[in-house]
């Protein structure tokens, strides 16, 4: 019989299709795994609601669980339980190493434009904090664009939500 | 129709139709940053619509796709503000500012709802909407003294009230039917091999 631990291990190999350096477990989108006999129930929280990667992640999780010989039930939980604070320290480091600046920790109040336009966001390439906001929006809903004034490199900043 | 499903459809229709209108800037915005911004905002709004339709579909015993695409234009519950095709940039930004202000207030009310599913989804949506509001705020600051922009704001302001007060939603503009025709054309054509 499959165990919850085996399921977690299998899910740790399912990559985010848009940022393949990070797994769904490190992204913090797997909220719960329950095993009942041959049936595995996974609670999955979307990152951004319009993210096209969601369906792919859901299908890949079901596929990996099926490979363990169990029947998967991936439930999409439409509540507020995911924030970028759920990304694990290991996930944040993997993002940084791949050139995506990890999200700043979420504060009590929502981000303000003046904060995002200020210095203080670290360049993932050279570590400088002398960086400027180029665009609140980027190539996917989860990313903004910034520019490093030190190494003169544009980079993608994971949005804090 | 059940009260909750009706409320969810009003908001979902606003977000779907506005998402379609925002996506019309993809490829033709005045500069690249705005092309990316409006494409991304459109993607978020359609994503919010989908989540809201899914919740409504459960109450109504149907699917999100059927709610989004299989109703007639008259059956949509969106506000006229989101239906208009606005090829002028000043009008697009004016609508963006007005809609985001109204939507922020609507989300605050929903987050305080006794219905945990509605409150939870509203809080989730609001996390993303923060960035839409920052974008609208940036443009408001940039254009606030431009006469073309302030005229567009005055022109569209009366339509913004219906975003917050659905009892003011009275019929649709002809532009909704035109958009609907385009939006549902692939689904209605039933290409060979499709099963929806």
Image (cartoon, coloured by chain):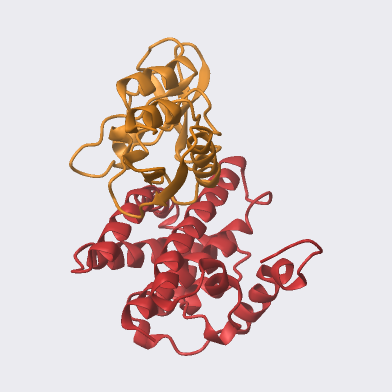
Chain colours: A orange, B red
Q: Quadrant of residue B36?
A: top right
Image x and y of residue A116, in percent: 34, 34
Asked if one can make out residue A26 in the rendered structure from this viewpoint, the answer is no
Left or right: where A128 falls relative to B183: left
Report how many numbered discs are placed on residues in the image: 0
Q: Residue at x 41, y 61 (%)?
A: B97
Classify B112 as above or below A149.
below
Image x and y of residue B163, in percent: 38, 75
Classify A139 as above or below B49.
above
Q: Residue at x 68, y 49 (%)?
A: B27
Q: Residue at x 28, y 63 (%)?
A: B117
In-front residue for pair B17/B69: B69
Image x and y of residue B183, in percent: 66, 68
Classify B170 as above or below B127.
below
From this viewpoint, which residue is outermost toward the right? B192
In-front residue for pair B149/A23: A23
Q: Quadrant of the C terminus of chain A?
A: top left
Q: Residue at x 46, y 74 (%)?
A: B156
Left or right: where A91 falls relative to A55: left
Q: Quadrant of residue A32?
A: top left
Q: Quadrant of the N terminus of chain A?
A: top left
Asked if one can make out residue B21 in the rendered structure from this viewpoint, the answer is yes
């Amino acid at each position: 019989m499959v165990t919850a631990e085996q399921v977690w291990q299998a899910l740790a190999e399912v990559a985010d299709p848009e940022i393949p350096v990070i797994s769904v477990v490190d992204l913090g989108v797997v909220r719960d795994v329950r095993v009942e006999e041959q049936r595995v129930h996974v609670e999955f929280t979307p990152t951004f609601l319009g993210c096209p990667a969601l369906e792919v992640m859901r299908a890949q999780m079901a596929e990996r669980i099926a490979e363990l010989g169990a029947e998967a039930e991936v439930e999409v939980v439409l509540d507020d339980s995911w924030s970028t604070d759920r990304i694990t320290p290991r996930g944040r480091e993997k993002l940084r190493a791949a050139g995506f600046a990890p999200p700043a920790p979420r504060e009590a109040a929502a981000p303000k434009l003046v904060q995002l336009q200020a210095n203080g966001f670290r360049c993932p390439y050279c570590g400088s904090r002398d960086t400027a906001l180029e665009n609140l929006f980027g190539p996917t809903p989860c990313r903004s664009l910034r520019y490093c004034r030190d190494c003169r490199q544009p980079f993608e900043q994971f949005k804090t939500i | 129709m059940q009260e909750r499903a009706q409320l969810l459809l009003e908001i979902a229709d606003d977000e779907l139709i506005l998402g379609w209108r925002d996506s019309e800037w993809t490829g033709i915005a005045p500069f690249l940053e705005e092309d990316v911004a409006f494409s991304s905002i459109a993607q978020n709004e359609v994503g919010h619509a989908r989540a809201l339709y899914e919740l409504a579909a459960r109450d109504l015993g149907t699917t999100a796709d059927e709610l989004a695409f299989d109703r007639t234009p008259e059956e949509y519950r969106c506000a006229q503000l989101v239906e208009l095709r606005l090829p002028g940039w000043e009008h697009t930004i004016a609508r963006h500012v007005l809609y985001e202000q109204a939507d922020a207030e609507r989300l605050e009310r929903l987050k305080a709802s006794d219905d945990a599913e509605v409150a939870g989804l509203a809080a989730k949506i609001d996390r993303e909407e923060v960035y839409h509001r920052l974008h609208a705020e940036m443009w408001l600051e940039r254009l606030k003294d431009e006469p073309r922009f302030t005229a567009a704001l005055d022109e569209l302001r009366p339509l913004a009230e219906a975003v917050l007060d659905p009892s003011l939603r009275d019929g649709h503009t002809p532009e909704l039917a035109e958009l609907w025709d385009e939006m549902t054309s692939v689904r209605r054509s039933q290409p060979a091999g499709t099963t929806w």
